[in-house]
Image: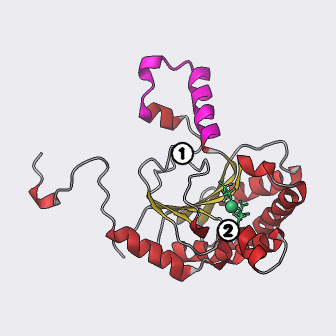
Amino acid sequence: MSGLPGHVACVMDGNGRWAEQRSLPRTAGHRAAEAAVIEVIETAYAVGIPWLSLFAFSTENWRRPGGEVGFLMRLVQRSVRKHAMSLHARGIRCRFLGDSDARIPASLAGDIADLVTLTRANTRMTLTVAFDHGGRRDIVSAARSLIRDKVPAERVTEETFARHLPHPDTPDVDLVIRTSGEQRISNFMLWQVAYAEWMFPEVLWPDFRAAHLWECLDAYRRRERRFGDVHLPTTTRKG
Ligand code: IPE
Ligand code: IPE
Ligand code: MG
């Protein structure tokens, strides 16, 4: 399939509303989200998308009630343990984007580190899980790193700055899909989404399936990306 995005990122939103619609606790929505996560990874993998990023927990999500946060931590830990071998068997390199906040349980941090180490040499696809992630925090961390490295002000360009971000080899995001109809960035990969195409399907994340991803990919192919330029058919462009 031509015209595929090289880097797709999903803001997996709507778990709580999915549960509320069924008169279930919000945690039931998070549990139901796992099926969507697996289907999106499988589909992106099958289609041949080389970079997939999933927003699983934001720096702001620590504001949620302790019970919900604890549930999410346990859920992520269970998923990491359950799917580590199958992700590795498929040649998927797994990464986590986010600080190792002291509030993350040590055993979960250990399982995450094991998964990253296990899959670090894989090359078929890179799956980045944005977990305890904040776009602004990443930008601040790059600024700190430049200062620590004593990079002179005149040598700070967009390129050098980007090299100081966490996981600096991550390419710009081409397509962001935010489910549930909410239309905001919520501090997600701020640097990397600068020129991304955005899609806001109304479907709640636990109901997101391969067909929804296909629709987004299809719509992406029909978008015209200009990057600030004017529209010109490539055949007529001179110099
Ligand atoms: C997204 O679903 C999951 C996380 C933020 C962890 P929400 O929990 O935000 O669901 P809504 O937005 O309340 O429906
Ligand atoms: C963004 O969703 C974070 C994740 C999907 C993990 P939120 O539901 O936390 O964002 P807001 O609060 O609606 O902006
Ligand atoms: Mg939400």
Residue 217 highlighted magenta (yes or no): no
Image: magenta residue range: 136-158
Q: Secondary structure at mark 2?
A: loop
Tell me the kind of residue under disc 2. Gly
Q: Secondary structure at mark 1?
A: loop
Q: Is residue 123 left or right of residue 233?
A: right
In front: 7, or 62? 62
180 is higher (above) or lower (below) than 53: below
185 is higher (above) or lower (below) than 201: above
Residue 3 visible to an observer of this rendering = no
- In the image, residue 22 lies at what x, y percent? 78, 81
Picture quadrant of ligand 1 = bottom right
Question: Label 2 crowding class (10 Å Cα cut-off): few <14, some 14-19, many 20+?
Answer: many
Q: Is mark 2 within 8 Å of ligand 1?
A: yes
Residue ID at (45%, 47%):
194
- In the image, residue 232 lies at what x, y percent? 17, 56
Q: Which quadrant would the C terminus be assigned to in this image?
A: top left
**Whole-Å distance between the Cαs marked 1 and 2?**
21 Å
Which image quarter: residue 25? Answer: bottom right
The residue that disc 1 covers is 190
The residue that disc 2 covers is 14
Q: Is residue 231 left or right of residue 161?
A: left
| Helix, strand or loop for the magenta stretch, by majority | helix
| Discs 1/2, front | 2
Q: Is residue 32 left or right of residue 142?
A: right
Tell me the kind of residue under disc 1. Leu
- In the image, residue 15 lies at what x, y percent? 72, 69
Residue 95 visible to an observer of this rendering = yes
Residue ID at (57%, 28%):
143
